[in-house]
Amino acid sequence: MALPTDRVELSVIDSHTGGEPTRTIIGGAPGLSTTTIAEQIQELQKEHDWMRTSLTHEPRGYEAMVGALLLHPQNPEAVARVVYFNNVGYLGMCGHGTIGVAATLSYLGKISPGEHLLETISGDVVFTLHEDNRVSFVNVPSYRYQTNVPVATNNFGTVTGDIAFAGNWFYLCADHGLEISLNNVAELDRCCREIRHTIDSQGIHGENGGLIDHVELFGPPNREDAHSKNYVDCPGGEYDRSPCGTGTSAKLACLAAAGKLEPNQVWRQESVTGSLFEGSYAWQGDKILPRIMGEAFVTAETKVIIDPTDPLTFGFSQ
Ligand code: PYC
């Protein structure tokens, strides 16, 4: 990868969805020579990964930062094509990011309340911008793959959990014995790392070898309007400040498979920060189509300057 030798200016809009940031690039990104979204992600990875690290690593970003690059869609019906990325790479599906991108497009005056289509690497995603600023989207077909999978940890005993797919692979666990609270993030993080370590070292995986790179811990909610509270450990080692769109979808898939939630019944998932997503589902064969609703707010409209004479301009991380 050749780093830019000239100054680059990127136009970005920052938003947060239930506390989880999305940094949407709306201008200044290098032109891509490829056509399909899969090729474009490969090209970004190979030729322009500096853009990802510049926006998500320190000094401009931090470990929770998720980027979204808007590209021209192939389908004229789509409002945009979007590539999500974070501090460690490019993402499959990103629920909070979908809500953040929708809020950004609305802020820019590019969409009005109603239904819209986004092209993503996981397929077309239909989202609805509601009159009250909330956004709902239909996630990719999701399913519980295995149930009651034991995972031994050094410091937290043997926990059991389900494995589910919802655009990302999740291990979902409720018997960890920890309080889900912002005061307890260090312990929650340690527990998730130990679970991830055992999952990796014992070759526990999703269907067709799918990499389980998200661990989701559940506990009782604090909010009266919520059914459950979660802590979601993401691939870069950071935790999702929102209830996680794909994580809430994975939970819906497990509840549906266990016969604990009916189609169209609403599940309210609280996050470790106290924010809330509403989820419901419809069956599609033996999988579910989750619908997730949340709200995002724009926090900044920024020109990011990437100055090659600055030794830390492309970002640094631990
Ligand atoms: O909301 O799906 C989500 C998500 C995945 C990683 C961070 N947020």
Image (cartoon, rainbow, N blue to C red):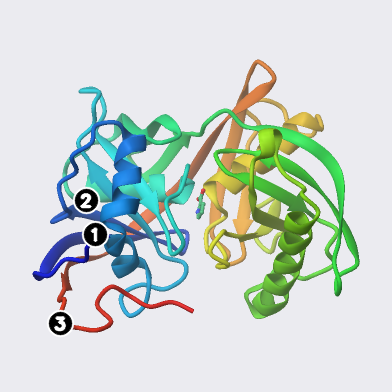
**What separation in Å lies between label 2 and label 3 (alpha carbons)?**
34 Å
From the viewer's side, name the closer residue of 231 and 207: 207
Asked which quadrant contains residue 253, the reply is: top right
Name the amino acid type tagged 2: Tyr
Q: What's the mark number on residue 107?
A: 2
Q: What residue is shown at x 80% (from left), y 37% (from top)? A: 146
Name the amino acid type tagged 3: Thr
**What separation in Å lies between label 3 and label 1 (alpha carbons)?**
25 Å
* Dot 1 or dot 2, earlier in sequence: 1
From the viewer's side, name the closer residue of 268 and 20: 20
* Dot 3 or dot 1, earlier in sequence: 1
Apparent side of residue 23 relative to residue 149 in the rendered image (left or right)? left
Q: Is residue 215 above or below residue 72?
A: below
Q: Is residue 315 above or below residue 29?
A: below
**What separation in Å lies between label 1 and label 2 (alpha carbons)?**
9 Å
For disc 1, the marked residue is: 13
Indicate which label's residue lies in the foreground, 3 or 1: 3
For disc 3, the marked residue is: 309
User: Considering the numbered disc 3 on the image, is that residue within a helix, a strand or a loop?
Assistant: loop
Asked which quadrant contains residue 301, the reply is: bottom left
User: Considering the numbered disc 2 on the image, is that residue within a helix, a strand or a loop?
Assistant: helix
**Whether residue 228 is visible:** yes
Q: Residues within 10 Å of mark 3 (few under 14, many from 20)?
A: few
Q: Position of residue 25 (x, y in %)?
A: 23, 55
Q: What residue is shown at x 52% (from left), y 39% (from top)? A: 292
Name the amino acid type tagged 1: Ile
